[in-house]
Image: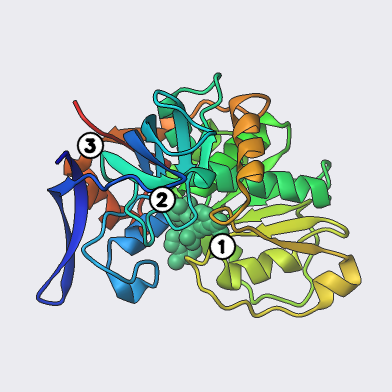
Amino acid sequence: MSIYQGYLIEEKEGAYKGSIQTISTPEIEDNHLIINVEYSSLNYKDALSASGPKSGVTRNYPFVPGIDAVGKVTQSMSDRFHVGDEVIVTGYSMGMSVYGGFGEIIHVPANWVAKLPSNLTAKEAMSYGTAGLTAAASVKKIIDSGIDKNKPILVSGATGGVGSVAVNILNKLGYEVHALTGKSSEDEFLKSIGASTVVLREEFMENPTRPLDKSIYGGAVDTVGGDILAKILSMTAPKCSVSACGNVAGMELNTTVFPFILRGVSLIGIDSAESSIEFKESIWDLLAGEWKVNLEDSTKTINLDSLGDEIEKILNGKQVGRIVIKHGE
Ligand SMILES: NC(=O)c1ccc[n+]([C@@H]2O[C@H](COP(=O)([O-])OP(=O)(O)OC[C@H]3O[C@@H](n4cnc5c(N)ncnc54)[C@H](OP(=O)(O)O)[C@@H]3O)[C@@H](O)[C@H]2O)c1
C-alpha cells in the first residue's frame, strides 16, 4: 500500500488542528486521476476549511484542505490524460469534501482537471492559484460587461490574494488602478504591483454611504463584500461594472436599486470554483499569455511545516500577496 504526507485537520477535544500525517493513497476510480502534487497554494477558503465545520466549508473531518494543486498524473482512468501529464486542479469539491492540495497526492475526477499551459511553470500556476483565477475572471467579466477606461478602476482587499493579482492584471492591461486596503503599512507594496493610488479603508468608509455618491470609479473588482461593496456601488460611474467574489467584510449587502436603475451599473457575481472547466482553461491561457504578470515579489513559498502560521494570518486579514506550498524536498 502506498502512502503520502498531508496536512490533516483533526478534531481534538472540540478544537480543530492541523498536523503533517502519513495517509494511504486511495485506489483509483473510473474516470479519475491520481496526481502527484508539486505545489499547492493558500486561499481564504482553505483557512476556513482548516478551522472546522462551523466555518461552513468542510463538513467531515479528518480532512486535508487545499483547493489548488498542480502536479503530474501518476495514474489515469481517463482518455483525456496520460501518466506524466502536467495538470492544474482548482475548486469544485476539492479541498471542501475531497482531499486537496495540502497533501502530496490527490485523487480527482478527470473533468476537474486542466492541462498546465506550456508557457506557465508549476510554481507560477500556484502563484496565481484560485486567487489568480478569480482575479482574472473578475477582470474579464467587468471588461466584457463594460468599464470606463478614462476613470480609475477600484480593487478592494487589495493586498489579499485575489486583490493583489487583480491590481497586477489591471495595471498590465493599462488601467489606472486604485487599491482599497485596510493596511496603511502596505502603500509601497501596492504601488509596486501597479496601484496609482492607495485608498485607506478607514477613510473610504468615513462618511455614511448614500444611495448615489460621486461617480468616481470606472469599474471595480470587489473581493470583500458587505458595506464596502455597497459604498463602491454608489460610487460607480454610469454603465460601468463591479464584480463581487468575497465576503470577508460581511455577507450582507445593504444597498438601494439606484446605482442599477439610475446609472445602469452592473453587479457581476463570480464563482470561480464551480466555473466550467472550459472557462477555467480559457482563463489559464490568458494568465499564461497576454495577461501574464510576474508575481515573484508578491509570493512567498513555504512547506507544510509553516502552513499553520500562514493559515492564522489569512484568517486575521493579515496576509499580503500569495502563499505557495511546495511539497517534497
Ligand atoms: N467567489 C469565488 O470564486 C472566490 C474565489 C476566491 C476567493 N473568494 C473569496 O474572496 C475573498 C478574498 O479571498 P483571498 O483568498 O484573496 O483572501 P485574502 O488573501 O485573505 O484577502 C482578503 C483581503 O481582504 C481584506 N480584508 C480582510 N478582512 C477584512 C475586513 N474585515 N473588512 C474589509 N476588508 C478585509 C484584506 O486586504 P486589505 O487589508 O488590503 O484590505 C485581506 O488581505 C474571500 O472572501 C474568499 O472567500 C471567492
Viewed as shown, does residue 11 lie left or right of 63? left
Q: Return the residue at label 2.
A: 67
Q: Amino acid at mark 1?
A: Glu
The numbered mark at residue 203 is: 1
Q: CA distance from mark 2 to mark 3?
A: 16 Å
User: Does 79 appear above or below 225?
Assistant: above
From where the camera sits, is residue 121 visible? Answer: yes
Whether the residue under disc 3 has CB within 8 Å of ligand 1? no
Please state which of residues 257 and 65 is positioned toward the viewer in this rendering: 65
Q: CB under 8 Å between callouts 2 and 3?
A: no
Identify the residue at horizontal 82%, vertical 52% (top origin).
Answer: 145
Q: Earlier in the sequence, mark 2 or mark 3?
A: 2
x then y, percent, for residue 227: 59, 73
How crowded pointer 2 is (Cα within 10 Å; few <14, some 14-19, many 20+) is rated as many
- Foreground mark, 1 or 3? 3
Q: Return the residue at label 3.
A: 303
**Residue at the limit of the structure toward the left, as seen here:** 13
Identify the residue at horizontal 70%, vertical 78% (top origin).
Answer: 255
The numbered mark at residue 122 is: none
Viewed as shown, does residue 326 lie left or right of 111? left
Q: Secondary structure at mark 2?
A: loop
Q: Secondary structure at mark 1?
A: helix
Q: Amino acid at mark 2?
A: Ile
